Image (cartoon, helix red, strand yellow):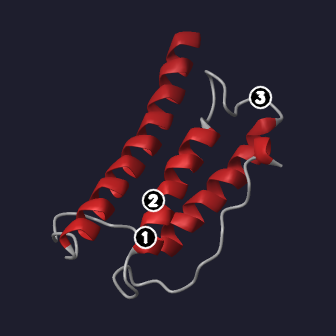
Amino acid sequence: MHAERLNLWEDFNHCWLTALQRQKEITEESLESGQRPRPTQTLMGYDQLENLGRELVRLCDLMEKPGLVDYQMGVWEEEIISMLTACLDLIEDQPRGSTGSTARGSIPPTSRQR
């Protein structure tokens, strides 16, 4: 079962990182072309990404006690938050109105950054 658990956590973390990498690529393409993403591409707004980040930090705080954060078996919190922050930074660089969001807050620091 240990190997299956390792695979589960690795898949979980890769899903987060892959989704955020694609988000970053679509945002960069949109910035370079000056056009909105194609209808077949989904671009999350600033608020959605920020909420995902807050929720991830909250969940990681709960999982820290059993040691399931930033280890081989657990959430790669720092890497995920770093990629998410890169996406947020790109969105902030877009002209107003292109993401449908106006509020600008911040993701709380990860457990390791406090």
Choose the circle earlier in sequence order: 3 or 1: 3
13 vs 112, nearest the viewer: 112
Which amino acid, by three-letter code, is at mark 1?
Ile
Left or right: residue 31 compared with residue 59: left
Q: Quadrant of residue 94?
A: bottom left
Left or right: residue 106 compared with residue 14: right
Choose the circle earlier in sequence order: 2 or 3: 3
Q: From the image, tell me which residue sits under label 1.
A: 91
Is residue 1 visible in this depiction of the protein?
no
Left or right: residue 39 compared with residue 7: left
Compute the Cα span from label 2 to label 3.
27 Å
Mark 2 or mark 3, which is nearer to you?
A: 2
Which amino acid, by three-letter code, is at mark 3?
Gly
Q: From the image, tell me which residue sits under label 2.
A: 87
* Residue at position x 79%, y 30% in the image: 66
Compute the Cα span from label 3 to label 1.
33 Å
Which amino acid, by three-letter code, is at mark 2?
Cys
| Label 1 environment density (alpha carbons within 10 Å; few <14, some 14–19, many ≥20) | many
Q: Identify the secondary structure beneath mark 2.
A: helix
| Label 3 environment density (alpha carbons within 10 Å; few <14, some 14–19, many ≥20) | few
* Residue at position x 60%, y 58% in the image: 53
Left or right: residue 95 compared with residue 29: right
Q: From the image, tell me which residue sits under label 3.
A: 67
Q: Position of residue 1 (x, y in %)?
A: 56, 12
| Label 2 environment density (alpha carbons within 10 Å; few <14, some 14–19, many ≥20) | many
| Contact between labelled residues 1 and 2, with CB atoms less than 8 Å apart | yes
Is residue 73 visible in this depiction of the protein?
yes
